[in-house]
Amino acid sequence: MSAPLLMLPSELQFLILQFIATGSSREQISDLIATSQTCRSLHHAVLCEKNDLVWRSSAIELGILPSVRLEAIIYPGSSTLEKRRWLNVVKLNYGWLQPFSLTRFRLQKAYRVLPPQEKNGNWFGRRTIEMVVSGAGTRKRPGYQAKQALSNSGGSVTFRISEESSNITATLDPALNQVTPLGSEHPQAPEWTATPFPCGVGYLVQKNNLGLRVSEYSESCSKSWNLEERAVDRFVSNENILVVVAFTESSPHIATKLSCVRSCSNETTISDKIWEIDVPVDWAEGNNQGRYGYAHLKNFHMTSTHVVCLVTRHPNERLGKLTRTEFIVVDLKTGEIVRKLRINTESSNPASGISQRAPFTTAFNHDFILTDIFIISGGPGGGLFVWDYSGKRDHFLYQVPNPWTTADSKTTNILRQYSDLTISVDGRYLGVTTSDQLLIFDMVSKERNSAYNNGRKVGKKARYMKNPTDDFPGGLWCWFRDWKSTKCKITGNVRWEEVDGGVAYLTDVMSQTIPANTESWNEHCVQVILRSILSIVSGRKSLIIAALVALAAWVYLQGTPHIELW
């Protein structure tokens, strides 16, 4: 006899399961998981893709706004080749809420080139780049900057190579082992600039009769914005919205005008302006002495619902004395301030009752990461701090643990200087770079952490420098994954399964994205062909299929000896 719950109409079952899933507490989410393990019918009802909407209420309780579509979430908990699901969004953000306990790292060597993809007889395999970040090096060689990898980028990444004569923007597609130049990068900021963030990689800026036309690099450059301002400093975009900060006549050296505009396909009309903020005037604070009066915009990022600005406070526009550092969260639709998060000078969580004043802060020494719920940034003492800007907490949630410990008690609390931050396309893994290492933190399980070395020799004296003085080249840290396609026997749907992966530090991206030795590359492909044919024959399949596979592989190899990357 079936359980009474299973005898109810499917609509009522869905409402009951949605009620169980509502709530951010661990007990409520675990109750729904336990319900799914009762029988096969409930397991299908709770975890199948058809009823994935049952998890949306849990995502809202965790901090996702009800108006946010699943497609608009920046980091959905799913990789590029995986289907987006509310279930993965809940798993991701619930894991981010949990603090770290004990952190261990296993140091590994990074590849110097992207290795050949091992398809193991599966000719429908793919390779995607899950994380990319620039690596610091000598100024004598070209420098690199990378655009944040996103799940809607198809597994490829956009980067910029900065040389003395020109700046080149290009995309790296690991699936085709190909680098495609896109064109010139947007003009450099003025000689004196208070902050370089966000970096603005992946945009084309052109002057026209209206002012400036900003276009996002794509196959058709379909997203464009016409701006009245000609002295544009920095900008970020999300879908068809662009947030830009520009200089004014009254402030020619410090960008103070923050604007939000919509995209415009017509080149003859100005983009519609949603709101505009004069940062020093509209965000001014102060007491009788005016010590918090001047607001200076250091950095900003955006989601589909908010703009988060990193702001420093000073007595006046000379920026001589730093009196406060804070995050200001702005509503994307109205431009109104939603809340403020003050970065204290204490390096411990105020909720723990233990405080220690730090001698310095790294809040604006490198970029910060923004998701739909969380902020991760530098802070007091050089640490990394996680903030929940969607909740009611006025202090940070927890601090990412220090991976370096020394036997000398005098230097135990001294942290190495982080060069840059990044995050994987699914939002699960946090990447942190130093002068010679890439550290990857698992923000969900808090256990699967790893570290990679690029071969740079860093002595004891240079250990705490962001970029020691030597001849080591700059490059790109790339964490890649190899996938194979599988077919579900029950539903018949094709899905992707991860089979391999690794981390590479690419110093000459334009020529070393595939193995330089063409003969060894061809030998590798021939070996894969033979293994594929043997696997087909051993499976008692038709020899005609084996011949077709060999013919397709031969045709593929005709274009393999030389792959032009420029």
Image (cartoon, rainbow, N blue to C red):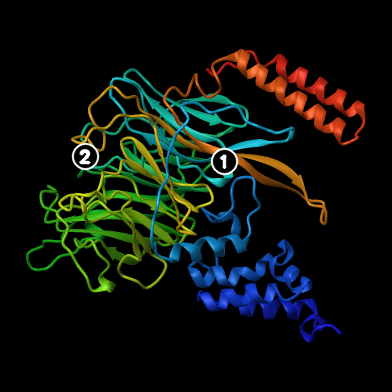
Q: Secondary structure at mark 1?
A: helix
Does 28 sit left or right of 401 as displayed? right
Q: Which residue has dot 1 on it?
A: 153
Q: Are marks 1 and 2 in contact (CB under 8 Å)?
A: no
Does 545 sit left or right of 327 as displayed? right
Does 135 sit left or right of 322 as displayed? right
Q: Quadrant of the N terminus?
A: bottom right
Q: Which residue has dot 2 on it?
A: 252
User: Which mark, residue 111?
Assistant: none
Seen in the picture, residue 565 relative to 469 is either above or below; the reply is above
Q: Please name the residue shown 28% across and 22% down the image.
A: 471
Q: Please name the residue shown 12% across and 47% down the image.
A: 318
Residue 46 rendering spot, x and y as whole percentages: 69, 70
Q: Earlier in the sequence, mark 1 or mark 2?
A: 1
Residue 509 rendering spot, x and y as whole percentages: 47, 24
Q: Type of residue at label 2?
A: Pro
Q: Given the current orientation, which residue lies at the most extreme left position?
A: 289
